[in-house]
Amino acid sequence: MEDLIAGDLKIQAIQRTPTILELLWLGKSNARNPTAVLSPYFSQVLTVAMEQKLTIELHFERLEHFNSSTITAIIQLIQEARSKAVKLTITFDQGIKWQKLSFDALRVFSKGDGLLEFRPAS
């Protein structure tokens, strides 16, 4: 899986184990319409995850900022992953106020089906 570089945002794709694809978010996601770039990338990621039966881990611990438009793209990813039965784990730094608030709000998308997990970074 290729990395994504879009403006101030970089998403590094790393497969450290045979069952997990990590997406490390770095920099800032501050584009006006990040969905235009993120949606096609997420589609590729989901295709790979489905074909190889991978869990996708989104790591936001090192992300400096994302705007509200980025949250929309993440919600779309959550919904698309669920429709394809791909497990997502979202790891964030709960010591950073904007991350804690953003990801606590996204917990409403947890359905108890085991397909979405939120994990505070240790």
Image (cartoon, rainbow, N blue to C red):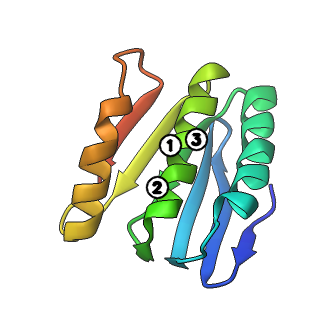
Q: Residue 48's quadrant in the figure?
A: top right
113 to 5, vertically: above or below:
above
90 to 30, vertically: above or below:
above
Residue 8 appears at what percent x and percent y? Answer: 61, 84
Left or right: residue 58 compared with residue 19: left
The secondary structure type at the circle numbered 1 is: helix
Distance (Cα) linking label 1 and label 3: 4 Å
Left or right: residue 111 compared with residue 80: left
Mark 2 vs 3: CB contact within 8 A: no
At 71% across and 76% down in the image, what residue appears?
Answer: 6
Residue 31 appears at what percent x and percent y? Answer: 60, 76
The residue that mark 1 highlights is 75
Mark 2 vs 1: CB contact within 8 A: yes
Along the line of sight, the residue nearer the viewer: 3 or 36: 36
The residue that mark 2 highlights is 71
Q: Quadrant of the C terminus?
A: bottom left
The secondary structure type at the circle numbered 2 is: helix
Image disc number at residue 76: 3
- Residue type of the residue flagged with mark 1: Ile
Q: Quadrant of the N terminus?
A: bottom right
- Residue type of the residue flagged with mark 3: Gln
Report if residue 122 is visible in the image: no
- Residue type of the residue flagged with mark 2: Ile
At 80% across and 35% down in the image, what residue appears?
Answer: 47
* Label 2: few (<14), some (14–19) or many (≥20) C-alpha neighbours in 10 Å: some
Q: Residue 94's quadrant in the figure?
A: bottom left
At 68% across and 83% down in the image, what residue appears?
Answer: 7
Along the line of sight, the residue nearer the viewer: 110 or 3: 110
Distance (Cα) linking label 2 and label 3: 9 Å
